[in-house]
Amino acid sequence: MKKFYSGVIKYRYVIMVLFLIATLFCGYSRNLIKVDYDMNDYLPETSPSTVSIYILLS
């Protein structure tokens, strides 16, 4: 365990830079993800819940 802590202290700037790069990559990638919030797109057309929603909307 002492080896781990001494490694973290020794390479703290490298770890911080890697963490910053990973954070920036995740922040950029978040904009590339498309989320479909409409659950009806995943259900078959003949599903009772889909048919009921179509009846309610018309």
Image (tube, helix red, strand yellow):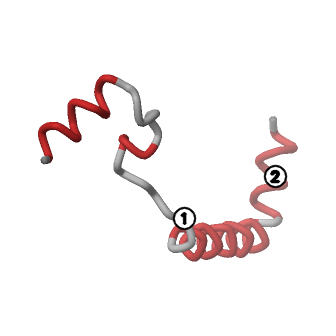
Nearer-the-camera pick, 43 or 10: 43
Which quadrant would the N terminus be assigned to in this image?
top right
- Sequence order check: which comes first, mark 2 or mark 1? 2
Q: Is residue 22 left or right of residue 52?
A: right
Q: Residue at x 38, y 26 (%)?
A: 47
Image location of residue 39, percent across then percent down:
37, 41
Image location of residue 12, percent across then percent down:
73, 66
Residue 33, which numbered label? 1
Q: Which residue is mark 2?
A: 6
Query: Are dots 2 and 1 in contact, CB under 8 Å?
Result: no
Disc 1 marks a residue whose amino acid type is: Ile
43 w.r.t. 20: above or below? above
Q: Residue at x 54, y 65 (%)?
A: 33
Secondary-structure class at tag 1: loop
- Report which quarter residue 15 is drawn in: bottom right
Disc number lying in front (2 or 1): 1
Disc 2 marks a residue whose amino acid type is: Ser
Nearer-the-camera pick, 51 or 5: 51
48 w.r.t. 36: above or below? above
CA neighbours of label 1 inside 10 A, class few (<14), some (14 to 19), many (20+): few
CA neighbours of label 2 inside 10 A, class few (<14), some (14 to 19), many (20+): few
Q: Residue at x 43, y 46 (%)?
A: 41
Nearer-the-camera pick, 49 or 37: 49
Nearer-the-camera pick, 7 or 32: 32
Image location of residue 8, percent across then percent down:
77, 56
3 w.r.t. 22: above or below? above
- Report which quarter residue 40 is drawn in: top left
Q: Is residue 11 left or right of residue 28?
A: right
Image location of residue 45, percent across then percent down:
41, 36
